[in-house]
Amino acid sequence: MGRPWEADPDTGFKRRLGKSALELGATSTGPECPDIWELENGDIAVIGRDLTGSLGTRLPDGVSISPDERLVVIPRRMLIAAKADIPDV
């Protein structure tokens, strides 16, 4: 039996959710990560710091990371800024 959800490598980027890292003061050099994007297929892409190696060793019970997944961290203010762009359903 396959996974109930698979990431679509052929989808495109639709729109940024929230504000850019530059607008939020999460970067000082230019428009690099972190970022949150809605994809054309409705899924969400998150660009952030890969802390799989450190936080991934201390996961809560019942949480796991597959070999093809990464634990990515973004600033709290970035998710708060995206809240208005995220639909309730």
Image: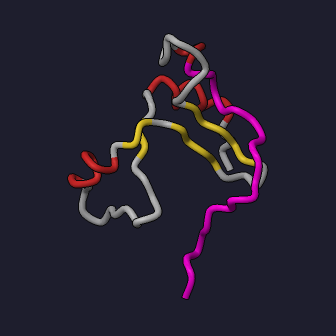
Q: Residue at x 21, y 52 (%)?
A: 58
Q: Could you tell me residue 36's position as x and y percent?
A: 60, 36
Q: Could you tell me residue 82's position as x and y percent?
A: 60, 30
Q: Quadrant of residue 76?
A: top left
Which corner quadrant holds the N terminus?
bottom right
- Please state the extent of the stretch shown in magenta in the rendering: 1-21
Q: Could you tell me residue 11's position as x and y percent?
A: 75, 55
Left or right for 40, reference 75: right
Residue placed farthest to the front in the image? 29
Q: Is residue 57 above or below residue 62?
A: above
Q: Could you tell me residue 81's position as x and y percent?
A: 57, 24
Q: Residue at x 59, y 32 (%)?
A: 83
Left or right for 79, reference 19: left
Is 77 magenta? The answer is no
Q: Is residue 79 above or below residue 89?
A: above
Q: Residue at x 49, y 16 (%)?
A: 27
Is 3 magenta? The answer is yes
Left or right for 39, reference 24: right
Q: Residue at x 72, y 52 (%)?
A: 42
Which secondary structure class fits the magenta region best? Answer: loop
Q: Is residue 54 above or below residue 8?
A: above
